[in-house]
Structure formats: C-alpha cells, structure tokens
Image (cartoon, rainbow, N blue to C red):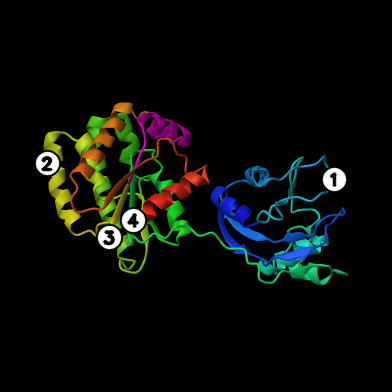
Amino acid sequence: MQQSINQIFERLGSIKQVSKVYETPAWGFKGNAFLNACIEIETIFSAEKCLKELLEIELDLGRTRLPSGEYSNRSIDLDILFYGDECRQSETLIIPHPKLTERDFVLAPLKDIAPKLKHPQLKTSIIDYFSQLKSSSIQKVNGLQLNLPQLPEIQHQYLAIEGNIGAGKTSLASSIAHDYNAKFIPERFKDNPFLPKFYKDHIRYAFPLEMSFLADRHQQLLDDISQFELFSDFAVADYDFYKSLIFAQVTLGEDEYRLYKKVFDIMYKELPKPDAYIYLYQNTERLLSNIKKRGRGYEQEIQPEYLENLNKGYLNFIKNQQFLKVKIIDISELDFVENRKDYLYLLEEIAGF
C-alpha cells in the first residue's frame, strides 16, 4: 500500500490526505482478509490518464487480473472513487465509482479524509452514507500508518527560472509556486503591442520592443517584490531582469545597445537579485517544436538562428556571472509537464543546489 502511494506521488501528483487503514473479510469470494485505505491526490492529469497509470502501478506491484467479474486475492487494487465533481461513464471508467455508497470498506476510510464530501449525483455526504449502513465487519488496524510522500525542500527565498523562448520556464515556475505555496512572478509579455510587429520586422521594432520590455520588467519587479518579505517568504519568477540585456545584445544595433545599456545599468542596481538562478537549456529543435505546439501566431516566424543567438547570450552571461548562484539544467530529453517524474527530478536538482 505504501509503495502504491509512493508511485502515485511519483506519477500523478501530490498526496493531500491519507486515511487510516481498515481490515475487512474478503468480499465476493472466499479468501484472505483485505486491507483498505483512501487517499486524496491533486493532479493535472485527466481521469483516463490517472486510470492508465493506476493500472500500470498494479502490474508493477504484482497484480494479476482474472477474467472480468471474477474476484480473488490480490497484491493491490487501486480504484478511482471521485474525480472532482465529474460524472462520466465509458467502457473503461465510471465516475463516481458505482458501488462506493454500498461498501463499508470504501466508506470507512473515505469518511476519514472527506466526511462532508457529497456525491455529485446523489447529493448525500460520505458520513451520512456510512451511518446508513445496516451492518459492518470493518475494523481499524491499529499501529499501521501510511505516510505522505513529501516534495523536496527548497531553501531559496527568491528563485528565478530562466531559459530560451519555448523552454518551459513559465510552466515550471508556476508549478513550483503552486506546489510550494510561493508567490509567482510571471513575466507580462502577452499585452506588449510591439512583440507581434517585432517578429515581422526585427530592425524597425527592436529598440521600442526592448525598451518597452525593460520598463515593464523593472516596474513589475518593483511592484511584486515589494509585496513579499525577502527573508521569510518564497517567490519564484519565470524570468530575471538581466534577460533584458541578453535579448538587447541579440536584437539591437551597436549604437542603440550602448544607449540601452546605460538605462539598464541604472535600473538594475536598485532591484533585488535572485538567490538562485536556474537556466533551462533545451536544444533548438525542441524549442521550435514547443513554440509550434503552443500556437502563438506571432511566434511562428521565429528562426533557429535567433534562438541559437539567444542561447549563446544566456550562456555567455552565465559564464561571466560572479554574483548570482547559477545552475544550468539540460531539459532537452525531459517533459516535466506530461511526465511527473521529470518534474520531480527538476525539483530535486533545484533543492540540492
């Protein structure tokens, strides 16, 4: 049971609650007594994806399935009882579980973690269903406690996640902010009126675009960072102010860049610096694939050379950086959005940094 919980944590999402463990006689056949428990998880994945992963976990832990309708002793049996408030029925999945209101070995552990939860169709609470049972043979197992797996502890107070266009920095930063109850500082770029124009005419719109970004980033960081206590709160941003200079080096001509850098240096001095700077490296082919997948129209004209120049700019900044604590993580072979194990790997890397 503990191995199942650990694998669910690794594959599907954070475990929010675990019930006590209960024992019942075998149900539907003559066999060994069963141990039963319920957990609550938080996941970004669909119910179908969850079911697929649960079936694989069963197989990993030695479950052998008999023909449909037959009951037997088993090493593990994992069922989805509820998936939010959803109600659905397909050939492979019925939500809520159709028999949960009739079974004491489901209701007893479920009332430990969600007594007031109401069935979305029947509108009756779990505790009420349990109290309506005419008889029950279930017994709590004393001295047996299932543990909640924990995310690695991140010690940083101000974490900056950086990377090239399409590297996934916003996805990672927002996930970390959610999971660690941190303040999320996202870059505001979608409303920049110069960005679509820049991708169509680099030379004409490079300087107004970079100056616009510079002013916006400076104001945003002043506003956002002033709202939290650097020595007690945890904030994670999907950009660092220095990226302004990196992009400007790539996009601006020599004279424009000199003027830009004078303004940048004045602004940079007064901003707090992140105590940890993570650079997500991804090869150009994956970046272009990610950009195409997310479907922002104005980004579809981005050329490989532009991305490669940006990457060189980032790496040159990192190589010559003396004051920031910087870590480069190659994510070219990772998918931390669709694969939770990859996400947990990145958390371990950041926590150990």
User: In the image, 47: left or right of 168?
Assistant: right
Camera-near label (4 vs 1) is 1
What residue does disc 2 label? 258
Please tell me how crowded label 4 is: few (under 14), some (14-19), or many (20+) other residues with Cα within 10 Å.
many
What residue does disc 1 label? 70
The vertical placement of 134 against 312, above or below, is below
Q: Position of residue 227 (x, y in %)?
A: 34, 66
Please tell me how crowded label 2 is: few (under 14), some (14-19), or many (20+) other residues with Cα within 10 Å.
some
What residue does disc 4 label? 159
Q: Amino acid at mark 2?
A: Arg
Camera-near label (1 vs 2) is 1
CA–CA distance in space, label 4 to label 3: 16 Å
Callout count? 4
Q: Secondary structure at mark 4?
A: strand
* Badge 1 or badge 3: first in the primary sequence: 1
Q: Which of the two residues, 223 or 330, is positioned nearer the viewer here?
A: 330
Magenta stretch, overall SS: helix
* Badge 4 or badge 1: first in the primary sequence: 1
CA–CA distance in space, label 2 to label 4: 29 Å
* Badge 3 or badge 2: first in the primary sequence: 3
Is the Cβ of the residue at disc 1 closer than 8 Å to that at disc 3? Answer: no
User: In the image, 347: left or right of 66?
Assistant: left
Is the Cβ of the residue at disc 4 closer than 8 Å to that at disc 3? Answer: no
Please tell me how crowded label 1 is: few (under 14), some (14-19), or many (20+) other residues with Cα within 10 Å.
few
Is the Cβ of the residue at disc 2 closer than 8 Å to that at disc 4? Answer: no
Q: Is residue 290 magenta?
A: yes
The vertical placement of 346 against 164, above or below, is below
* Badge 1 or badge 2: first in the primary sequence: 1
Q: Position of residue 72 (x, y in %)?
A: 82, 49
Question: Where are the magenta residues, as a range?
Answer: 279-300
